[in-house]
Image (tube, grey):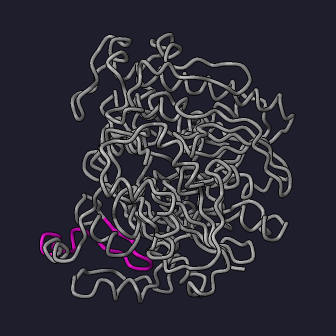
Amino acid sequence: MNILGISALYHDAACCILRDGVLIAAAQEERFSRIKNDPSMPYHAMQYCLKEAGITIDDVSLLSYYELPQKKLSRQLYSGLPDVNDEILKRISPYTVEQEIAIRLGYEGPVCYVPHHLSHAASSFCFSGFNEAAILTMDGVGEWATTTYGTGRGVNIDLFEEVNYPHSVGLLYSTITSYLGFSVNEGEYKVMGLAPYGTPKYLDQFRRLLQSLDEGQFQLDLSYFDFMRQQKMYAPALCELFGQPARVAESPLEQFHKDIAKSLQVFLEELMLEKATYLYNRTGLKNLCLAGGVALNCVANGRILREGPFDALFVQPAANDAGGALGAAAVAYIQETGQPLPEGKLKTACLGPAYSDKEIMNSLKGIFLKASSFRHEPERLVKRVAELIAEGKVIGWFQGRMEFGPRALGSRSILADPRHPEMRNRINAMVKKREGFRPFAPMVLEEKKGDHFELDHASPFMLETCQVKSPLDLPAITHVDGSARVQTVNREVNPLMASLLDAFDALTGCPILLNTSFNVRGEPIVCTPLDAINCFIKTDIDCLVLGNYLFYREENRMDVISQLLELYAQQPSDAISSQLYTFL
C-alpha cells in the first residue's frame, strides 16, 4: 500500500510517502522550487517521493490531504475576504484542492481528507514511539481550530477540546512579530532569538491581549488586532497599549523591542505550561506530543519538559504545516488497516534526496571548480575537515539525504568551531547575512551531551533549549542567557557526522560543532549540489564538502564561477506575505 501525504495551498507545502506504513521519503516543495514557504501543490516534492519509492503515480493506492477544504472555506467566509478576483475565487473554492490534485499531480485515485489539527496531532503521536500520550497542538489557524487537546492510545487519537479562530496563540505571536518589524510566517524565530536580550517588563500588557480561561480555553481581545480585516496584523490600539509605534523593518533594534520580545516569550511559555498542566490533569498520561507551528518554539518546549508534569516529550521535526503531510498519511494508513505505523519512533529527519559522487560531478559540469577527491576515504575526509574547522574555517557540509523540516541536522549544514569568540558574528554577517543577535546551535555526540549541557535525554531534532554547563568556553553557540538549542548526534543514525565530531574531539578536546542551516537569509535550505555551489559562491564560506569532494575558496576563481551560475541559477523568492499571516 503506497500512501501519499500532502500539505499544500496555504504555506509550507510538502509531500511524503508511506509504503505499507513505513515512511520512505518526505520533502518540502520550497527546496525544489527555491520559493521560500512555497504553498503550491507539491509537484516536485511528489516526484521526488515517487522516485525514492521506485514507483509512479499510478502505483499510489491513496492520497491523503491534511485539511478539510469545505470547513476551511466556512472560516474564510466568516473572516471576510479581500477584494475578490479570479485568483482569490480559485484559492478559496472547496473544489480547488481536488482539481489541483488531478491536474497538477496527475492523480485520479481515492483521496482522504483529514482535519488540519488531526493531521498535526497524528504527525507527532504516530511517529513518537509512545503507546499512549497526551497531545497538544497549537498554530495560527487550521480550518477553525487554533489549539487542540487530545490523547493518543494505540491507533486512536481523540481530540476532545479545541480553541477556535480568531483566538490563537500563533496569531498573537505573529502579530507581535509584525509589530517588531519582522516578517510574519518567518520572523517568529527572530523574536525568539531576540528575547534573551530583554526583560519581561510588559507582561501585564500581554495579559490584556490574551486572557486565559477555564480548562484549555483562552481568548484574544480583538480590539488590539487587525488580522480579521486582512489589512495588517495589529490595530492602532496595540501601539497605544505598548506606548510606541511599530518598528520599521531593518531599523535599529532598541531595548524596548528586546523587552517586548522577552515579554512575549515569557507569556507564551507561561500559557503553554499552564495549558499543558491542564492537559496532564485531564488525561493523567505521562508522555506529551506537541505539534503545530508553535511547537517549533524550542525555548517553550524545553521549559515545558523541565517544569511541567510530563516525563517525556516528543516534537516531530517538521511540526509546522509541512509535517501535516506525515500526519495525514498516517491517519489514512490507520483508517485503511486498523494498525499503527510499524516502525514506531521517528529516528531521523533525513528523508529528502541524496546525490552520489557521480551525480554531484555531473551537475557541476561546465562550472570548472577545482576539488580534492576523498572517494573511498571517508576517514581522511573527516580528519581534514576537522583540521579546517579547528583552523577557524567555515565549512559548507552537503552529505546524504536532505532534512525534512526547518532545521539543518548535519546533511545540509554550515559547520564551524563553537569555541571561536568571533565565529557567531562572522557567520551572521558574512555567511548567513542576517541579524547579529541570532544564535547558532551546537551539535554534540549523544553520549557526551551531559558533560556540556543540562540535558539528560537525546535531542536529535534540535527542538528544545537547555543551559550550557560545559567546562569549555563555547561563545559561538552559547546564547546571551547561557542557553543553547542542542542537537544530539547518534552514531547509528548519522555515523559520518559522529566520525567528524570524534575527529574534532580528538584534535581539540571538544566533541561539539556549531551547526546552522546551509542557506542565506531569505532562501530555502539548499537541496541540490548546484544549490550548494550557488550558496558557497555568494557567501564567505571557506570550504565546501559535497559528498566526497572538498572545494577550497582560495583555489577557485569565484568571480568567474559566479558569472557562469547566473546563466541558469533560479533567483529565490518568497511566496508568503511578510505583513500578514496567510489566511487563504
Q: Which image quadrant for residue 540?
A: bottom left
Q: Residue 554, how many percent across, how many down?
A: 21, 69
- Residue at image position (37%, 13%) is 242
The residue lying toward the viewer, choosing from 574 and 422, is 574
What residue do we see at 47% from left, 20% from top?
Answer: 263
Q: Is residue 531 left or right of residue 202?
A: left
548 is within the stretch colored magenta: yes
Residue 42 visible here: yes
Quadrant of the frame with the N terminus: bottom right
Q: Position of residue 545 (x, y in %)?
A: 39, 71
Work out whether 543 lies above or below 516. Answer: below
Q: Position of residue 126 (x, y in %)?
A: 74, 57
> On screen, 578 above or below 272?
below
Which span is picked out in magenta?
543-560
Residue 485 shows in the view = no
How many dots with numbers?
0
Q: State yes or no: residue 110 in magenta.
A: no
Horizontal side of residue 120 vs 129, given as left or right = left
| Left or right of residue 246: residue 440 | right
- Quadrant location of residue 366? bottom left
| Residue 225 placement: quadrant | top left
User: Residue placed at 60% from the left, 67% from the top?
Assistant: 5
Q: Position of residue 304 (x, y in %)?
A: 67, 32
Identity of the residue drawn at 53% across and 14% down: 207
